[in-house]
Amino acid sequence: MPVPQREFGHNAVSKQIFTIGYEGLDSERLAGILRDAGVHMLADVRAVANSRKRGFSKGALGASLREAGLDYTHLRSLGTPKAGRQAARAGDAALLRRIYCEEVIDTAAGQTALDELAVLAAATPLCLLCFERDPSICHRRILAERLAERGFAIQDL
């Protein structure tokens, strides 16, 4: 079901941030979901934007999204450190959160990157991308929560 269109930018009534995991999707389905939700930009928040899954490495993903009329950006600095990725694969959301917050989001560089993400998300309908289908075991949930503290509504696709 499509998400209702909202006004974005400085005069927005409600700022919206979307999140999605590409696990189980192909790049065409991903683009369709994003378009149906009214997303204009995909923010890839993987530390390593390579994938064994066809079409989801940085170059191929960016190209297919541009062909579909969507913008793409890779925000490597907001990716999960290796230990956090291992915790996510093990399904340990608490350990993932601790590692991600300590090593990324609660650092000066992490705050700067989060500020930049908030500016992008306020300017255009934006979706955070990582691999995990379940946002509760992915660092994009933490990013979305931090953006919610800044007035963004969260929508998992």
Image: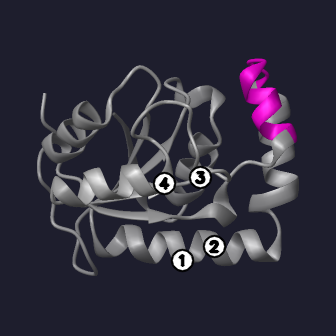
Q: Are marks 3 and 2 in contact (CB under 8 Å)?
A: no
Q: Looking at the image, which is closer to me, 1 or 85? A: 85
What SS does tag 3 mark?
helix
Q: Is residue 133 magenta?
A: no
Q: Residues within 10 Å of mark 3 (few under 14, many from 20)?
A: many
Q: Position of residue 1 (x, y in %)?
A: 13, 27
Mark toward the start of the polypeptide (3 vs 2): 2
Q: Position of residue 4 (x, y in %)?
A: 12, 45
Q: Nearer the viewer, residue 14 or 131?
A: 131
Q: Indicate the quadrant where residue 42 lies.
A: bottom left
Q: Earlier in the sequence, mark 2 or mark 4?
A: 4
Q: Which mark is residue 14?
A: none
Please state which of the two labelled residues, at mark 4 or mark 1, is closer to the viewer: 4
Residues drawn in magenta: 83-92
Q: Are marks 1 and 2 in contact (CB under 8 Å)?
A: yes
Residue 24, above or below 77: above
Whole-number angstrom distance, CA of label 1 to CA of label 2? 5 Å
Residue in the picture at 56% in, 64% down: 75
What kind of element bears circle 1?
helix
Q: Which residue is mark 4?
A: 58
**Separation (CA) of disc 4 from disc 3:** 20 Å
Let me know if residue 10 appears in the view. Answer: yes
From the image, give the main secondary structure of the stretch colored magenta: helix
Per the image, the residue denoted by label 3 is 143
Q: Earlier in the sequence, mark 4 or mark 1?
A: 4
Report helix, strand or loop for mark 4: helix
Nearest the eye: 116 or 152: 116
Q: Please tell me whether mark 3 or mark 2 is closer to you in this view.
A: 2
Q: Pinpoint residue 157: horizontal percent, then vertical percent.
A: 33, 33
Q: CB of mark 2 within 8 Å of CB of mark 4? A: no
Q: Which residue is mark 1?
A: 116
**Residue occupied by mark 2:** 113
